[in-house]
Amino acid sequence: MSERASFIAEPARAARAALRPLRLATTDEKNAALRAFARLLRDGEAALLAANRRDLGALHEATAAFRDRLTLDGKRIDAMARGLEAMAELPDPVGETITTWRRPSGLEIAQVRVPLGVIGVIYESRPNVTADAAGLCLKSGNAVLLRGGSEAIATNTAIADVAEKALAEAGLPSGAVQLVRTTDRKAVDEMLGALGVIDVIIPRGGPSLLHAIHEKARVPVIQHFEGICHTFVDRAANAAQAVAICVNAKASRPGVCNAMETLLVHEEIAPSFLPEVASALESRGVELRGCERTRAILTQARAASAADWDTEYLDLVLSIRVVRDVADAIEHIAEHSTGLAEAIVTEDRATARRFAREVDAAAVYVNASTRFTDGGEFGFGAEIGISTNRLHARGPLGLRELTTYKYVVQGDGQVR
C-alpha cells in the first residue's frame, strides 16, 4: 500500500490481521458473534436512533426516497437484527466439500470452500448494509472493510461499534469488521487501488458510483450497473395475476434495482389488458410512458423516447411497449436488459420454458415479481449485493457467493 493511503491503512491492517484467526473460527463461535450482534443492536436502539437523527439533520435538499433509504426506526433495527439471527441459522459454507473425485494415480481430490479474504464494501445511504455486510462476511470467514456514504457516517459508525463489541464478546478478533471512518472521497480511491491488501471490492450504490468504481478499480470488483428489469405479459397470462405482479414489481418500492422499469405486453391482449393494468398502476401514482401502439390504447400515456428503454427510473415511472409475441419480447430484453432480473407472466408452459431458456439474466421469473431478487427472499439471510457479473458470482450475493475454493489432494506417496 502506498504512503498516501492514510485513510485506509490502519483499518486495512486490522482487517488483514484478523483474517487468519477468523478463518480458524468454528461455526459455533461465528454464530455466537452474530447473535450477540443482533442482541446488541436491539439493546442499543436509542443510541442508533440518536446517531441516525444526526445524519438526517445534516441532510440538505434530499429527496423523499433518499431520506427514506437513510432513515432508521425501531422496525428497521429489528429487521437488521433478525437478518443476523437468520444468518446464524444458515449452514456454514466454510470447509464445505463441493465435490470429490479419484484419479487413476490414486490421488483423492476434494474441492473445498474457503473465504475470499478481505472484502471491501463501498456503499451509499442505506445503513442496514453495514450490518448485513458485516454479518455475511463474518459467517463466511471474511474480514470486511466498510466504506459507507458520508450522509450516514454517524449511523454507520454506531453500527460498526456494535459489531466490534459483538466480535469481542464472542472471542473473535474485533478487527474483522472495520469501518473507514472518514467522509473524504479519497478513501474510496485508496480502497480501489489497494491491490494485495483488499482481495475484492463489492459496491452498492447508484449508477455514478458504480461506473466510477468500474473505471478506477485495480482490485477485482463484483458489481452490477443499472437494474433495468422487464416484465412480459404473454397472451396466455392470467390477467388478474399479471396486474398484481406488475403493480408489485413497479410500485411496491420503485427506488430499488429489482423494480420493473419496462412492461412488455403481447399484442393480442393489449386492448383489454393495458387499460386494466394502467388503472391499477396510476392509482399508485405511476407515470406511464408508451410506444405508439400503447398510446393508441392509453391516450393518457406520454410518448416513450428511445432513451426510455435504457433508463433505470428508480421512481414511479414505467415504460410500456406492445410486442408481437414472446420472440419479440425476448429480442427487446436482449437489447435493453442489464441482466439483473426479468419476468414472464403466462399459463403456457412451452412459452415459459422458452423465455427461461433464452433470456440472459441473473434471475428469470415465471409468474412472479422481479422484486424477489433479494438475498433474504432467496433464503440467504441477507445479501451483500446483487451481481450481474458472469465471473465468480451472479445474482444475490449470500454466504456461498462470498467464498472461493481450494483443492485438497490426498495421496500415499505418489510422484509425477
Image: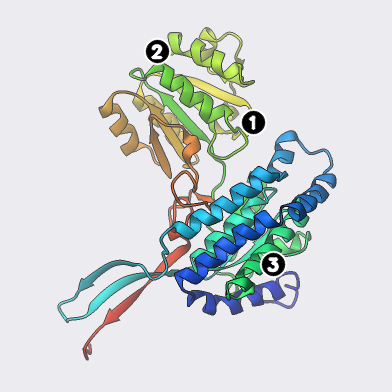
Q: Is residue 235 visible?
A: yes
Pick whichever, 10 or 85, lies toward us: 85
Residue position marked by numbered label 2 in the rendering: 269
Mark 1 secondary-structure assignment: loop
Label 1: few (<14), some (14–19) or many (≥20) C-alpha neighbours in 10 Å: some
Cα separation, mark 2 vs mark 3, equals 54 Å
> Which sits earlier in the primary sequence, circle 3 or circle 1?
3
Q: Is residue 288 above or below residue 272?
A: below
Q: Amino acid at mark 3?
A: Glu
> Which sits earlier in the primary sequence, circle 2 or circle 3?
3
Q: Is residue 150 visible?
A: no
Q: Is residue 159 shown left or right of residue 103?
A: right
User: Which label sits on residue 190?
Assistant: 3
Tell me residue 133's x, y (percent). 58, 58
Cα separation, mark 2 vs mark 1, equals 27 Å
Q: Is residue 287 above or below residue 410?
A: above
